Image (spheres, grey):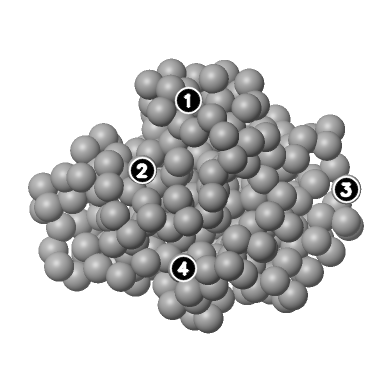
Amino acid sequence: MTIDVWMQHPTQRFLDHEMLATLRRWTGGAMPDDDVPIDVTIAAMDAASVAVGLLSAWRGPNGLDLVSNDEVAAWVRSHPDRLAGLATVDLDRPMEAVRELRRRVRDDGFVGLRVVPWLWRLPPTDRHYYPLFAECVELGVPFCTQVGHTGPLRPSETGRPIPYIDEVALDFPELVIVCGHVGYPWTEEMVAVARKHPNVYIDTSAYTTKRLPAELVAFMKTETGQRKVLFGTNYPMIGHTHALDGLDELGLSDAARHDYLHANAARVFARLEEHI
């Protein structure tokens, strides 16, 4: 049973935002131009035998609201056995952010927090994040974030695994951190940080199987790395079938393949139990 740990069900606000112009170029303009029924996303999952998807809400500074927590909650309620939510918060209002995260996890069953640092132009070591890290630990949910360069035309510095993820993991050793987009061009740094810290993980969103960096694939074949890498797509930018194409050629053992597609996500996102 495959679990996709990074998806978006796109709103029109999300699709129309100027920051996605480069992604439209990469996908040949294939992203939808109208509101998309949630059943379209479920069908995309079905086509690749993806059983459960984690839907991300998206919020940025100055009231930027691309995919709201309320929208994600409604989609999850419509398909509770197929979808789970990752909350977004307003970093500029720390106490409001903590309360929103707490409410979404306790009342709506969200399974984690996702903050995209380049959207805020604040690295994860910024003080705005730290109350949220403490709350994630208390709630028992992961902090999910982006590492590596940015596809949108925004500065990439906030996506460096070293120093940012490394220092957060040192300050909050109990915090589970899931780092999406493999960290390229700093994938070796990302692997080193995941190997160093027991609670740091990598997800493969934004990369098809055939484009995964060699150093990450080699890590997945080690005893440590087998438990550290989670499957993700970044749907709708990459479809599930396209993302998984070539999986048989990776050379993973049956156990490593199961961990990558299912077991690691089920363990890391402990609150997924009610969805799977």
The residue mark sitting in front, 3 or 2, is 2
Lower position in the chain sequence, tag 4 or tag 2: 4
The residue mark sitting in front, 1 or 3, is 1
Identified by mark 3, the residue type is: Arg
Is 31 on the left-hand or right-hand side of 109? left
Alpha carbons under labels 3 and 4: distance apart? 32 Å
Is 91 on the left-hand or right-hand side of 24? right
Alpha carbons under labels 4 and 1: distance apart? 26 Å
The kind of secondary structure element at disc 4 is loop
Alpha carbons under labels 4 and 2: distance apart? 16 Å
Alpha carbons under labels 1 and 2: distance apart? 13 Å
Q: Is residue 262 above or below residue 190?
A: below
The kind of secondary structure element at disc 3 is loop
Residue 267 picture quarter: bottom left
> In the image, residue 256 lies at what x, y percent?
22, 64
Lower position in the chain sequence, tag 1 or tag 3: 1
Which residue is identified by label 4? 82
Which residue is identified by label 3? 93
Cβ atoms under marks 3 and 4 closer than 8 Å? no
Residue 23: which numbered mark, if any? Answer: 1
Residue 3 appears in the rendering: yes
Q: Is residue 200 above or below residue 106?
A: above
Residue at image coords 43%, 58%: 42
Residue 6 appears in the rendering: no
Is 239 on the left-hand or right-hand side of 103? left
> In the image, residue 114 lies at what x, y percent?
62, 52
Q: In this view, does 91 lie above or below 237?
A: below
Which residue is identified by label 2? 239
The residue mark sitting in front, 3 or 4, is 4
Task: Work out whether residue 240 or residue 209 is closer to the camera in this orientation and state it.
Answer: 240
